[in-house]
Image (cartoon, rainbow, N blue to C red):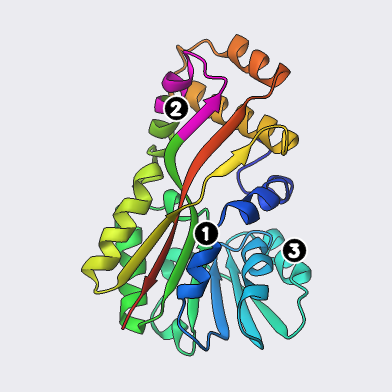
Amino acid sequence: MTGEFSESWLGLREPADAEARAADLVALLPADIHVIRDLGCGTGSMARWLAPRLPKPQHWILTDLDPKLLHYATAHVRIPDVSVEGALSNVTSLTPEQLDGTDLVTCSALLDLLTEGEIDALVATLAAARVPALFTLSVAGDVRLDPADPLDATIAEAFDEHQRRVTGERRLLGPDAPAYAGKAFERAGATVVTRPSPWRLGNGHPELTAEWLRGWVGAASEQQPSLDLDGYLKGRLASLPSASVGHVDLLATFD
């Protein structure tokens, strides 16, 4: 893959992200949302998608650990009546005090990169501040390709295990994250609504489909080095399949 958090990869996926997000969840948000904190903002794609769907004026606090991405995001969210600021910070260090005056917390393609403890802490922070959350495009572990291949299921299983890998002392939740986060929010007293938000890949997004295939197969090979997937990948790239790549969008609100 071009790089999980590279500017080029995030730019490549932005149109598919926009098509996949569950827009009907926006209608379920509380009224009078004007200050939004976006966690792990990347290039700012969440703001570009959501800001036009919310009342104006708005102020977005774009947060990320990568200073280059943060600089890009703050320079490329240009929407009338929307102001932005950048904050170099880690989602795991968020406090209720930082959310004072915040009306909504958002993130995109982030929950699956967290651990159980990190999601618990994030939910506790949001519950203490009584701030709603709209978390989109969390990996759900449901990949379907057409035409199918006998190796699809083996690769999908290896990829999911790679998503659950231990990095340092952190065991990532991967495709278990949406369900875990939903239960954590419910335990904290939130009302939770989820929607499927799958990518629809294929000839409509040829560059993204090819890059996703390389990353999907590459992660599976890394997880199970005994798999010989060179021929599989070559064949898939020569004739791109249609693909549904499962994600989940989650809205949590506090009364």
Calculate the distance from the C-alpha at mark 2 to the C-alpha at mark 3. Answer: 33 Å
22 and 219: which one is in front? 22
First of labels 1, 2 by sequence position: 1
Q: Which residue is mark 1?
A: 22
66 and 14: which one is in front? 14
Can you see residue 115? no
152 and 69: which one is in front? 152
Calculate the distance from the C-alpha at mark 1 to the C-alpha at mark 2. Answer: 24 Å
Q: Residue at x 53, y 84 (%)?
A: 33
Nearer to us of marks 3 and 1 is: 1
First of labels 2, 3 by sequence position: 3
Q: Which residue is mark 3?
A: 72
Q: Residue at x 30, y 54 (%)?
A: 180
Rendering quarter of residue 85: bottom right
Residue 178 placement (x, y as % from top left):
37, 52
Residue numbers of the magenta segment: 143-157
Q: Amino acid at mark 3?
A: Tyr
Rendering quarter of residue 34: bottom right
Q: Amino acid at mark 1?
A: Ala
Neighbor class of circle 3 (other Cα within 10 Å; few <14, some 14-19, many 20+) is some
Q: Residue at x 55, y 78 (%)?
A: 36
> Taking 96 as reference, is 218 above or below it?
above
Q: Amino acid at mark 2?
A: Ala
Q: Is residue 189 left or right of residue 243?
A: left
Q: Residue at x 67, y 64 (%)?
A: 44
Q: Is residue 64 left or right of residue 112?
A: right
**Is 156 one of the magenta-colored residues?**
yes
Residue 67 placement (x, y as % from top left):
67, 63
Q: Which residue is mark 2?
A: 156
Nearer to us of marks 1 and 2 is: 1
Q: Is residue 219 left or right of residue 175?
A: right
Q: Quadrant of the N terminus?
A: top right
